[in-house]
Image: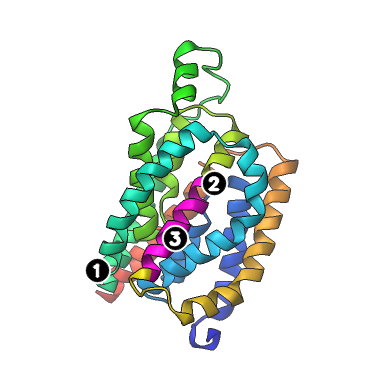
Amino acid sequence: MISSMPMLWPAVGLACFAGIVRGYCGFGFAMLLALGLMLFLPPIEAVPLALLLDLATSIGLWRRAGRLADWPRLRRLLSGMVVATVVGVSVMATLPATPMRIAVALLALAGAVALLLRRDAHPEIGEGDPESARREATGGGWPSVAAGGVSGLCMTLASSGGPPLMLYLLHQRLRPTTLRATAIMFFAASSTASLIGLGMAGELGRETLLRGAWLLAPALIGNALGQWTFERSKPRSMKVTVAPLLIALSVWVLAREAGYG
């Protein structure tokens, strides 16, 4: 039960905060929550819990995101994700806790640094360009499949599929609303596939479901606040929103592991 999870109130606050970030940016919930929960839960418990809440709290975003997403590109992303998820579940179920915790933190840190170093580009640049139109019509081709595979693998292993996918989508120079909607739909499918795989591997137990039930309400509240903010403010670069948070949490997890080593 939830009483068996240490630091309940920090977990509640973390779930709410992660919901705000995802409601605003369209991604980041599972990464932030998994990294935070790993401070007092083993990765094999923290990652499925983060994925479960990520899926549950995104339901309210699906309808609008489904209308705005880039579906030709999304279908290719999902085809790569499905294959990679099978590999990720196998690795997740076999790695010990300490190496897994370090791997999760390093993946999130690398993705956050990549986002931080990336040059911002205007989404409108390239609109009307024949090459941009061709990429949009074909869904990006094999690069989309590869990006979906990398993101799906990172999502299953570490709830850190956000940076690989967002780096790819940002490179496609999509409008902020289209980018956000495509990310929401991808992560909904990726979380579902990862949870099915982890459940079949016996890593999604009653304890995880109970903890998820307790943290669902604060996560939904945060999600609604983030969505409200997104609709009423100018979108901000991920360099000043998600990236610094991921770096701080990743360094914190790595520092704790070094201290206990």
Numbered circle sitting on residue 2 = none
Residue closer to the observer: 149 or 167 = 149
Amino acid marked by disc 3: Leu
Quarter the C terminus occupies = bottom left
The residue drawn where x is 68% and y is 44% is 230
Q: Residue at x 68, y 36 (%)?
A: 234
In the image, which disc is placed on residue 185?
2
Q: Label for residue 249?
A: 3
Q: Earlier in the sequence, mark 3 or mark 1?
A: 1
Give the mark nearest the N terminus, 2 or 1: 1
Query: Which residue position is annotated with label 1?
Result: 95
The answer to whether the residues at label 3 and label 1 have Cβ atoms under 8 Å apart is no
User: Helix or strand or loop: what does disc 3 sit on?
Assistant: helix
Residue 115 visible to an observer of this rendering: no
Residue 158's place in the image compared with 244, above or below, is below
Question: Which x, y percent locates residue 2?
Answer: 54, 84
> Mark 2 near mark 1, Cβ–Cβ under 8 Å?
no
Label 1 neighbour load within 10 Å: few <14, some 14-19, many 20+: some
Mark closer to the chain start, 2 or 3: 2
Instruction: Write down the quadrant of residue 240 in the picture.
Output: top right
Tell me the magenta residue range: 185-199
